[in-house]
Image: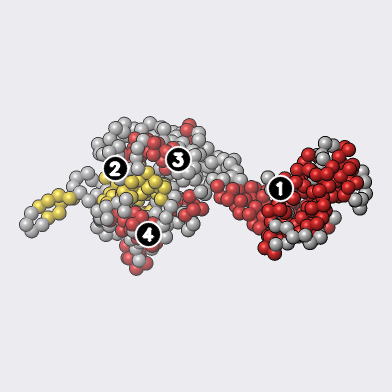
Amino acid sequence: MRQRLTVILTFVVIIGLLVIINALSHVKEDDSRDLEFAPNRSTYHSGPTGLRALHDFLNESGYRVMRWREPAAKLLGRSGEMVRTLVVVGETKLPLEEEEISALKGWVATGGRLVVVDRTPDRSLLSTDTGWAISVNYGDLPNLDTNPSDVTQMTKDVTELKPVQPTLVTSDVESVMPSRFASRFVIAAIPKPSPVAISQYREGQTVIGMPSPTPEEDDAWVPSSGQLPEEASPPPAASSSPVVIEDDDDDYSVNSAPVIHVGDANGALLVDYAYGGGHVILLSDPYVVANGGIVQKDNLMLAINMLGGPQTTGLIAFDEYHQGRGITQNAFASYFAGTPVLPIAGQLVLLVLVVLWTNGRRFARPLPLPQVDRRSSLEFVASMAELQERSRAFDLAIENIYTRTRRVLARHAGVDYNSSRSEIAQRIAERSTIDRNKLETLMRQCEEAINGEPITSRQSIHLVKRLREIERFLGLRMRSRDVRQAAENI
């Protein structure tokens, strides 16, 4: 009973471990409601705040797209050589570190295209370094009751926006439908920080691309009363006319101001500017590219143009690293992540370990090993025959055979084994057609050879042959052991 209990407990433990592995590996569908207040901007997410629709559309339309799951510093290495456009959407789950921002700027400066879609972009990431500042006018903030899948609720009291000028980004775009939570970009030329900008900074308005004032500058520019001096003037408005740069040898025009593609009286919705050898594109509303809003108006066409347009051949990478989808160090595990392959492999490993463990354990009383006779049943006979032949002991060979034949003849005749050969031959002749004298002569010759009469190999074989013929003629069955030995050698 103790041995049976060990076996039962072993099976219970195995089944329990398999249940635990299946429970841990079970991918439960996320039943929680998608909220605009806490969106998931991943391309893996199929909810209204995700970007899976845009990613799958580009992939199925022949665009070269990928999910970037490595740190930003990898863009400057061999991994980022093929990436032409990097898309960062929304407030990421993992914040951009200072080193990563520097790496992104360095990658853009080498000719990359950075697309930032956010209502509250990081101003350190979006520094223009061209004498222009981009400030953000925030819109309404979503709350817990905001349903991102409800188009009416997301676009309440919002009018569609039209391109402000024909550009490659607004090609084939008639109107764009943002959400009511979209912010606006305001562009201004700032040769140096002005008192008005400092006042705006104090009032809580974010100014992107402008360095923060020192306390001494703050006190010198803005009076303690908080009122601006009368001679202070507001910053110049953004102008579409080029900035003229004079040179001693020649005059030429360079427009270094950010370009507004879509906007209204409150500011720009879509802006792009040059940074080094590349470009930075700013979109102030993720709803335009999210699953819930990309089908509105020409939002999809605008998204395609932002990523390079229909003629682009470069690789488009969506940042999944900062969305919490970074690649693991184990390439095998990351490749099969989210599939049943890893749980199946774990169960197989568990079963193999159990089998190996049970092979080294005893679950019952010890039993002796079976004694297997590796010798053939006729090995003894063959060995004795070879020894008798080499020693020319033909009398011994005839004795082994004649003794058994005499015993079966006596049994067949119904007489005692010790009866005379003449009596045995007489009884056999009465019960068969065998000649009495021939049988008696054969028995006498065998007995004489056994008793030491000289005999040759040929004579011994002849006597044994005649004995076998008599057994076969009378139908005397061999012993069960002889039958078994004969069957084994067939």
Q: How many marks?
A: 4
Q: Earlier in the sequence, mark 4 or mark 1?
A: 4
Residue designated by label 3: 52
**Cα distance between the residues tagged 2 and 4:** 23 Å
**Cα distance between the residues tagged 3 and 2:** 21 Å
Who is closer to the viewer here, 205 or 25?
Answer: 25
Quadrant of the image for the C terminus? Answer: top right
**Cα distance between the residues tagged 1 and 3:** 74 Å
Q: At label 1, which amino acid type do we have?
A: Glu
Q: Earlier in the sequence, mark 2 or mark 4?
A: 4
Q: Is residue 467 visible?
A: yes
Q: Is residue 258 left or right of residue 369?
A: left
Quadrant of the image for the N terminus? Answer: bottom right
Residue designated by label 2: 313
Furthest residue toward bottom: 216
Disc 2, SS: loop
Residue designated by label 1: 488
Specify the color scheme: secondary structure
Give x and y (percent) for residue 55.
41, 40
Q: Earlier in the sequence, mark 3 or mark 2?
A: 3
